[in-house]
Amino acid sequence: MKVVGVIGTGTMGCGIAQIAAQNGYEVVFQNRRQESVDRGLANLRKNLERLVAKEKLTQAQCSEALALVRGAVPIAELKKCDIVIESAP
């Protein structure tokens, strides 16, 4: 398994995407609205940077995790995923 799809960019989806990325998996972070994807990516960045500030992650680990996550609006982007986790209401 190399690519994880996460449907839903709220709190739970953000946490799933973060854990997957921190463990070296590519993540497709999907929602049906671009604004929601952008907000989810911003929250993900904030959460990882908080871990850097607490010295639980290095800046390099934070950057590596962020590089593994990409936002997507079209659900067709999930076709390339090895597993898809739904966390949308």
Image: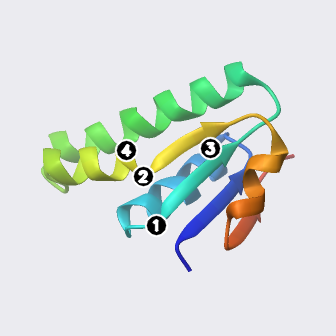
Identify the residue at horizontal 26%, vertical 44% (top origin). 63
Quarter location, residue 3: bottom right
Q: Camera-side residue: 79 or 56? A: 79
Q: Are marks 2 and 4 in contact (CB under 8 Å)?
A: yes
Cβ atoms at labels 2 and 1 below 8 Å apart: yes
Q: Which residue is label 3 attached to?
A: 11
Q: Position of residue 70 (x, y in %)?
A: 53, 42
The answer to whether residue 28 is above or below residue 25 is above
N-terminal of the two: label 2 or label 1?
1
Q: Which residue is mark 2?
A: 68
Q: Which residue: 49% across, 60% down?
A: 26
List the residue tagged with mark 4. Answer: 66
Q: Do callouts 2 and 3 mark residues in contact (Cβ within 8 Å)? A: no
Assign a secondary structure to mark 1.
loop
Give the distance between the C-alpha atoms of the residues marked 4 and 3, in whole angstroms.
Answer: 16 Å
Residue type at the position of mark 3: Thr
Disc 4 marks a residue whose amino acid type is: Leu
Is 86 placed above or below 77 here? Answer: below
What label sits on residue 25 in the rendered view? 1
